[in-house]
Amino acid sequence: MNQSKDAARFWAKVSKGPRENDCWLWVRAVADDGYGRFTLNSDGRTQAIRPHRFAFHLAYGADLDGFGPLMHHCDIPICVRATTGTDTHLSVGDARTNMLDRQAKGRDTNGTGFQWRGLARRQFAERSRALRDEVRAHGWEREERIRALLAGADPDAPTLF
């Protein structure tokens, strides 16, 4: 693997939010489960990897196969922000930690506590793609729309005021 070439190719596919603790969003391929897709090419073979896993690898130097499941603390499946100093969007987790995180965020009962959870796989992917498409088309300049999409809301829905 050519780390510097892969890293440059990777970062060209990421849009960083303007605020200090914003997500860094993957703006390319999104799989049917709502998570991003990225490929590494080494020794004549192609390896598919989740973008958030590659970002974690770049941030911490961990071997791509040397860490377990990652948890998105921001709950945005296309976020690739591995470290923010005091605020972490991604960290290594396990099933127990993930369940405790779900419970603490109120999304343990049918996903009703958070707009991204409790959705069918197709809807989950549609939300990720809508967010990705907005950021890819306009960057973060239409920040209000992006914030609505991050929250799982329809940015085109009429407001009361």
Image (cartoon, rainbow, N blue to C red):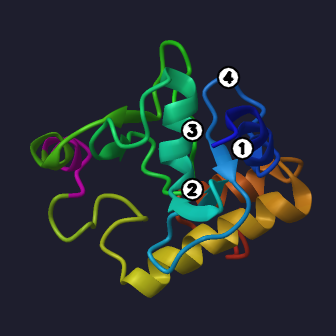
Between the C-alphas of marks 4 and 1, the distance is: 25 Å
Question: Residue 8: x and y, percent?
Answer: 80, 39
Q: Are marks 1 and 3 in contact (CB under 8 Å)?
A: no
Q: Residue at x 53, y 63 (%)?
A: 48
First in sequence: mark 1 vs mark 2 = 1
Asked if one can make out residue 15 in the rendered structure from this viewpoint, the answer is: yes
Residue identifier under label 1: 6
Q: Residues within 10 Å of mark 4 (few under 14, many from 20)?
A: few
| Left or right of 40 on screen, residue 102 | left
Q: Are marks 2 and 3 in contact (CB under 8 Å)?
A: no
Q: Residue type at mark 4? A: Glu
First in sequence: mark 2 vs mark 3 = 3
First in sequence: mark 4 vs mark 3 = 4
Question: Residue 12: x and y, percent?
Answer: 82, 46
Closer-to-camera residue (115/87):
87
Numbered circle sitting on residue 33: none
Q: Residue type at mark 3? A: Ala
Question: Residue 93: x and y, percent?
Answer: 24, 38
Q: Secondary structure at mark 2?
A: loop
Residue identifier under label 3: 55
Between the C-alphas of marks 2 and 4, the distance is: 18 Å
Q: Are marks 4 and 1 in contact (CB under 8 Å)?
A: no
Q: Residue at x 36, y 43 (%)?
A: 65
Look at the magenta stretch and give its main secondary structure. helix
Q: Residue furthest left?
A: 96
Q: Residue type at mark 2? A: Ile
Q: Residue 134 falls in which quadrant of the image?
A: bottom right
**Which region is colored magenta?**
100-107
Between the C-alphas of marks 1 and 2, the distance is: 18 Å
Q: Residues within 10 Å of mark 2 (few under 14, many from 20)?
A: many
Residue identifier under label 4: 20
